[in-house]
Image (cartoon, rainbow, N blue to C red):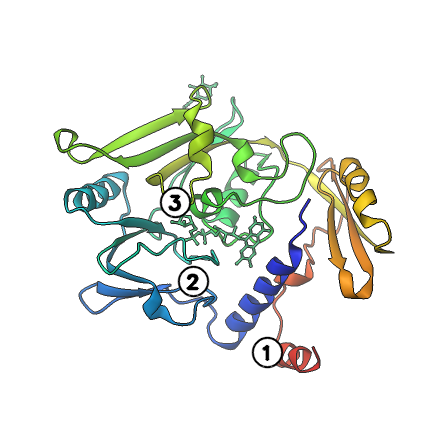
Amino acid sequence: MNYVRCFFICCAYLLATWISTVHSVPPSPVNCDTNGLNCLVSSTYRVWPDRSTCRAAKVTYPSTEEEFKSSVAHAVKNNLKIKVISKLAHSAPKLICPGGDNGLLISTRDYAKKIIVNISSSTATVDSGVELRDFVDAIAKYGLALPHSPYWDGLSIGGLLSTGAHGSSLWGNGGAVHEYVVGMRLIIPASADEGFVRIMDLTKEDKDLNAAKVSLGVLGVISQVTFALQPMFKRSIRNVLRTDEGLEEKIIAFGSASEFGDVTWYASKRRAVFRVDNRVPVNIAGDGVNDYIGFQKTSRAALEAQRDTG
Ligand SMILES: Cc1cc2nc3c(=O)[nH]c(=O)nc-3n(C[C@H](O)[C@H](O)[C@H](O)COP(=O)(O)OP(=O)(O)OC[C@H]3O[C@@H](n4cnc5c(N)ncnc54)[C@H](O)[C@@H]3O)c2cc1C
Ligand SMILES: *[C@@H]1O[C@H](CO)[C@@H](O)[C@H](O)[C@H]1NC(C)=O
């Protein structure tokens, strides 16, 4: 279940406002001088307005695993701190800041090429820079689906995994994306004898896989991730508005009865919206529209008016 929806809805509003008022595509979170040095770093929706509080000496944009290895080797050899950053950096905490002025940022912006589907095992292996929406679209062509995901699909695979991003479910292994990871390939620091860098392949037989899945970006660079997929399905969604009386007792029963169930609590109004959300076969007719209010394009005038009254 997702108890902290307000945070995400607020983020979505901020993001939508900002996109509709300033740019159609968000600008890069990393701004460096003309030589690509002395970078100031921000998150996409500017959660920390003073960019001088998050700096990096340099940013690299590898497009192959070999280039990632050389960036990591260079940093290890020169004793630099490393952080990985996705193309758009949506995380609110300063997880992408390397710390100090001497750190190296390695961006996955240009590392979004491979999505390899294995039909016989119902798995897919994907580069860490691939955006969630591109991944979902690619596997859909094979009739496959990732059963759970965060509600916003403009996040990178490496970034959403590192922070334990989730949808909403109490069923089975729950709604976190990392529960569906069956393999990972990491690029990690190594000794000078090994050339300062090493590849680590983890499969579901390695117990370290569980430790590596949600790393907050501190266990090395995630190069690739392999997911266990399911046959594609549709979701049938109905929102029910009720009073919040006895919510704390009703919520577990509700979550147990609805596979993707979700509750948004409007505490000051003493009400809650229960989202009854279940899996149905793909051949059931539906309107095929995701009209979740948080992520719709909204005009600047409407948002300004809403804020003035809010
Ligand atoms: C509008 C909006 C809606 C959201 N909705 C949800 C939701 O429904 N559920 C939910 O759980 N979360 C949600 N989130 C939060 C989101 O899942 C996280 O902020 C996520 O970490 C962002 O991923 P990113 O690709 O932007 O990563 P970044 O912000 O670039 O990075 C996040 C972390 O991952 C690390 N990292 C990134 N790539 C790699 C890599 N290749 N190797 C190693 N480390 C790496 C970074 O160093 C950093 O520590 C939402 C965020 C927004 C802005
Ligand atoms: C696909 O998965 C099957 C079953 O796990 C495995 O035997 C096969 O080697 C995989 N194919 C590739 C190309 O990795």
Q: Badge 2: how crowded within 10 Å, few (<14), some, or many (20+)?
A: many
Along the viewing direction, whichever of 172 and 118 lies nearer the viewer:
172
State the separation of the CA atoms marked 3 and 1.
35 Å
Q: Which residue is mark 2?
A: 43
Residue type pointed to by label 3: Gly
Q: Position of residue 37 (x, y in %)?
A: 20, 63
Q: Position of residue 130 (x, y in %)?
A: 42, 46
Badge 3 crowding class, 10 Å Cα cut-off, few under 14, some 14 to 19, many 20 or more, is: many
* Residue bearing the label numbered 3: 217
Of labels 3 and 1, the one closer to you: 3
- The answer to whether the residue bearing label 2 lies less than 8 angstroms from the nearest atom of ligand 1 is yes
In which of the image's four quarters is ligand 2 placed? top left
In the shown orientation, is residue 213 left or right of residue 179?
left
Which residue is drawn at the image coordinates 62% and 80% (left, top)? 304
Kindly tell me whether mark 3's CB lies below 8 Å from ligand 1: yes
Q: Which residue is mark 1?
A: 300
Which residue is pictured at 65% across the width and 55% down the height?
A: 5
- Residue at figure coordinates x 50%, y 29% from the top left: 123
Q: Earlier in the sequence, mark 3 or mark 2?
A: 2
How far apart, in angstroms, are the residues tagged by discs 2 and 1? 22 Å
2 or 1: tag closer to the N-terminus? 2
